[in-house]
Image (cartoon, helix red, strand yellow):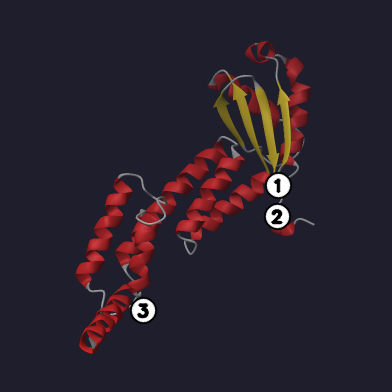
Amino acid sequence: GIRCLVLALTVCFASVAATEPTSPGSAETGSADIDAMLDAAEAAERVAHFIYPARGSAMSIYHDVLFYDPENAHAHAGLTRLAEHFLVRAQSALDKDQLLKADSMVSKARMIYPEYPPVETMAHQIALVESAERTRETLDWRLVAERSQALTPKLQRLGGIAKAGDCRVTINVSNDAEGRWVFQQLNSAHGDARVRAEVKIASPAAVDILCFEDPANAG
């Protein structure tokens, strides 16, 4: 009976030891195990399991690899790919002025790879847009199509706003020719600065101005 008890305790302690995590860089996790983990992470990427499920996602497996091998280049490259996936989506959302979605995408990229410098660069860009002063003027599309001088005073006033600070202008019109004409009117406003503008084929005809203030300098 005593021998059976000793044997049972020995098996129990061996089982507990096998389930305890080893320390980073431990020899108990060999190159074959790391390679298998990397294969699993890449498989998770292929089926878009980037962050979820919590265990078994590409992110969690790459993090596990770095626990055992902090300098593993393949794991760092994998986390970079995952973070870039969400940063691209953040930029796309920012371009469409979808600020909540852009913030969400950056949060996911930060969760994946907080040390990756472009994550904070994108977060800063979003913060600039969120804090920007916005001016929007809708234009009569008929007057734009006619290149009517009746629009010139309004456009020069908007051009003056755009020239007065660190501003970005979006011109929404029906075609490139109209966009060039609106830009010329904006740029003819008083001042030596040049209006920075992007033309978009969109409706309704309008001029959108974002004037930026660095959040770090905001009072």
- Pick the front one: 1 or 139: 1
The answer to whether 14 is drawn above or below residue 109 in the figure is below
Pick the residue in front: 163 or 93.
Answer: 93
Is tag 3's residue or tag 1's residue first in the polypeptide sequence? Answer: 3
What amino acid type is highlighted by mark number 2?
Pro
Residue 3 in picture, x, y percent from top left: 21, 88
Is residue 50 or residue 120 the one in the foreground? 50
Q: Would you say 211 lies left or right of 120 here?
A: right
- Which residue in the structure is indicated by mark 1? 131
Residue in the image at 61% along x and 25% along y: 172
Residue 202 x/y as whole percent: 57, 22
User: How far is disc 1 from disc 2 in space, using C-alphas?
Assistant: 7 Å
**How far, Cα to Cα, is label 2 from label 3?**
41 Å
Q: Give yes or no for contact between labels 1 and 2 (Cβ–Cβ under 8 Å).
A: yes
Q: How far apart in space, not on screen, are marks 3 and 1 (Cα)?
A: 45 Å
The quadrant in which residue 197 appears is: top right
Pick out the residue farthest to the front.
Answer: 1
Give the secondary structure at mark 1.
loop
Q: Which residue is mark 3?
A: 23
Q: Earlier in the sequence, mark 2 or mark 3?
A: 3
Q: Which of the 4 quarters of the picture holds residue 48?
A: top left
Kindly identify which residue carries mark 2. 215
Quick one: label 2, few (<14), some, or many (20+) residues within 10 Å? some
Where is residue 112? Give x, y as percent: 45, 57
| Comes first in the chain, label 1 or label 2 | 1
Q: Amino acid at mark 1?
A: Ser
Q: What residue is at 75 percent from the left and 39 percent from the top?
A: 191
Residue beneath the point at 41% across and 50% down: 52
Position above or below: 173 against 22: above
Judge the density around disc 3: few (<14), some (14-19), many (≥20) Cα neighbours within 10 Å.
Answer: few
Q: Nearer the viewer, residue 81 or 218?
A: 81
